[in-house]
Structures are given as structure tokens and as C-alpha cells.
Image (cartoon, rainbow, N blue to C red):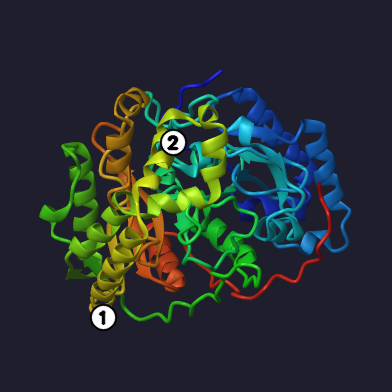
Amino acid sequence: MRTETHGPSVGPSVAEILASHAGGTGSPAKTAARVADAIAARGDDGTWLSTVPRAQLIAAAEAIERRPGARTLPLYGVPFGVKDSIDVAGVPTTLSCPDYAYTATATAPAVQRLLDAGALYVGKTNLDQFATGLNGTRTPHTIPRSVYGGEMISGGSSSGSALAVALGQVPFAVATDTAGSGRVPAALNGIIGIKPSRGLISTVGLVPACKSLDCLTVMAGCIDDADRVLDVMIARDDGDPWSRDRGPRYAGEPLRIGLPAATELEFFGDDAMRGAHLAFREHLARTHSVVDVSLDPFLAAGALLYQGPWVAERLVEFAGFLAAQPESIHPVVREIFAGGHRYTAVDAFAALQRLQELKAEVSRLWRQMDLLILPTIGTTFTVEQVLAAPIDTNTMLGHYTHFGNLLDLCAAAIPVGATADGRPCSAMLLGPALADDTVLHLAAQLLDEPRLAPSHSPVPVPTEELL
């Protein structure tokens, strides 16, 4: 049973949960019971595809309490969800396609680091099937809705991860972002979505959408929560060929903010969203150094993603399943997969060469600015609107996000207010590769959050089986 809501109701932060557990006013077991009860109270609203049963969740929390030095663990008893395209040992990985499902024999290293740090695994969250979509409707399960109500889509593909945080059920959730799948649902649910630089978080144990672009991300209610979680998850993994070390901390110098001309921004006829974003920009320009920048090369790169051969990269993973069980695949996802067959090797090389030209053009723009700020999304849609025009609406949702991983950028989507008619307005902060700490610094500043410098060092915690 779905309960109508009108905006995020983020629950206790990671810091508040840790303080409760350390001070004795709460405990991991009490937190586990609260989370289980909150999920049960909502019923099947499309947030979760599977959850640890209440008694088992409390038992897992009690096992964390018994670990040596448990209270010193950086995420002691903090509950979290995992997008159901990421492996957790002993739990089915379904990608929102029941016929594709398999039971994982090992936990993804990035998730294992969270478990080792004392975090409490709650369950798997819903997604657009095979992580293909930005709207959250491409699922055979209950279609989730945004916490803003009005039958607004939740966004995707990490729909359930965003909702679990926005509903206050968990303080953070693990998601993915290939073309905007972490940023778009964060925007539509009024929370924070952090897409780190590609390779900082291991993608081993993630069923790939586009392996050369995939990125594990974090949904959270505040920057401090994101900082704490990222500091655990980020680590070099020799099993991931894209793995790399994180970049430097923000050095403290004044930031030059790139803003494209307002005439370059597209809101698809949504005047209320345009007004809300331009009001945010006016405030930004009063407090920061602003640089005019062209959006053209960014959008040109984004157009390559679904109008070029990267669609075919999905077939590396799913071509066999498409051939053997096409009827098991959501019709829109099946159409997208099948479209990958029309591209040739010549198309791929031509697109790679064009992308390299655009990367060079964008790299020159970073000489005059430190970060670029755009809308995360230009408009919103209802479930009915998306079902009526699934491809066109999805393309509009990804207008500002499609180019992020193609151009090797890091990004954060943050809530910056609401439209005059009460819908969420989100800004996206983009930086060049490995400028993650600078992005997080500005995000905290814009949200008026104090920010402690993250340790940027591996968390020395033991590895043990918790499930």
C-alpha cells in the first residue's frame, strides 16, 4: 500500500545513528527493528525488491554489536540498501528481471568494505530493468513514485535506492550511474546523489550496463553521510581494470564556477523549473566567481551515448539472454538492446574518435573554470507521461547527465529548492576527473553544511562474513 508524500523525509544521519549507538540511547539492534518496521509500514511501494527478514536483520545487527571493537567501526550498525544489480553473497541478483536472476556467491568488494566497516545490509532496491533507463518505470514489479507525490516518477535506474533514502528508511544507499542513473532519481526525490570519478569505487560484482562507463554511486541525505560512506568505499581494486586512486583534497582556493548562458539551457517548456533554476543561479552569482562557458561540447558528447555505438556495449553482457529469452525482457529495454545490433566496428571507431575530439575541447574549458553547474534535470514527468512516450521522456531526463562518464567527469546532484508548483529543483555540480573533493566541498557549501576533511585513507577493518 502506497502512502502519499510530498517531499523527502530523510531519517537520522550516519553521524546521529553512530552517536546513538555509542551513547547507548540506541543500538544496532534497535535501529534494525526501526528500519524493518518502517519498510513494513510502507508495504509494496516499489522501493525494495528484497529485504532481510525482520528477525534475521535484528540478529545481524546483534552480531555486529558482538564484534571486537565494534563501537570504533566507522559505520557501526548503520543500515543501508544496495541496488539490485550489485552482488551480495547469498542474495539473488535480479536486475529487475526474474528470469535473469542468480544467487551471488560473493559480495561486491565495495559492498564488502561497507560490511567490514560495520554497516548493516538491509536489502536490494528496485531499478529500471538491466539498469537501462532514467525513469524507474521499466520494471515488472511495482512502479515506484517520487516522494513528491502527484504520480511523479521516481527516476531511474536507481529508483529504489533514492526512495529508500528519501523515505528515511536508511541514511544511505548504494546505486549506480552510467548515464545519470544515480543523479536523476536523487533529483526527483530531493536528496543527494554522488557520482564519483570513474574507477574510484570498484565495479567488481556489478552486472555491467556499459562496462566502460559504469560507476558505483552513493545516495544520501547530507554531504557528511556521503563523505563517510565514500571514505569507506573508495579503494583501489586490482580486479577492476578501470580502478584508480582518488585525487587531491580541495586546496582551499577560490572556485571559478562555469555557467552556460541561460539561453543554452533547456527546460522542455517547463517554465516553473526554469524559474527555479535561474533563481538559484542568481544567488550563486552573488556569492561565487562565475565564468561563461559553452555547453555545446558537453551536449555533443551526451548525444553519442544513445545515438551512437555505446548502446551496443550493453550486448556484451546481455546479447545471449536477449537471443534466448527475449520475452523475459521489458519491451522498451528489449527494443534498446536490439538496437545495438545495427552498429558496426566502423561506427564504434568513428564515435571514439569524435569523443576524443570533444574530450580535448572540454579539457581546454577546465583551464578557465574549476566546476560546472547545470540543472540535474530540465523537467519532471508523471508515470503516465513516461509510459506514453518512454524513449522521448527518458532522453529529456538525461539531457544534462548523459555526457558525464563519457567525458570522465565527477558529479553531485543536490537539492536547491522547489518550483513554484512544489516540484523538486536539483543542481548538478560537475568537475573533471579526480576533482571529487572539490565537488563535495562546493556541494556542502551550497547546502550550508559544515564539512570535515575526509581521511582519504583505507579503513582498517577486518573482513568477515556477516550474512
Q: Residue at x 75, y 71 (%)?
A: 460
The image position of residue 403, as x and y in percent, is 33, 58
Q: Is residue 162 left or right of residue 372?
A: right
Give whichever of discs 1 and 2 has the lower sequence position.
Answer: 2
Q: Residue at x 53, y 45 (%)?
A: 318
Which one is closest to the eye, mark 1 or mark 2?
2
Going by the picture, which residue comes out furthest to the top? 1
| Disc number for residue 246 | none
Q: Amino acid at mark 1?
A: Arg
Up-down relation of residue 464 to residue 53 (above or below): below
Q: Is residue 223 left or right of residue 380?
A: right
- Quadrant housing the N terminus: top right
Judging by the rendered image, the residue that carries numbered circle 2 is 333
The image position of residue 260, as x and y in percent, is 18, 61
Q: Amino acid at mark 2?
A: Val
Judging by the rendered image, the residue that carries numbered circle 1 is 367
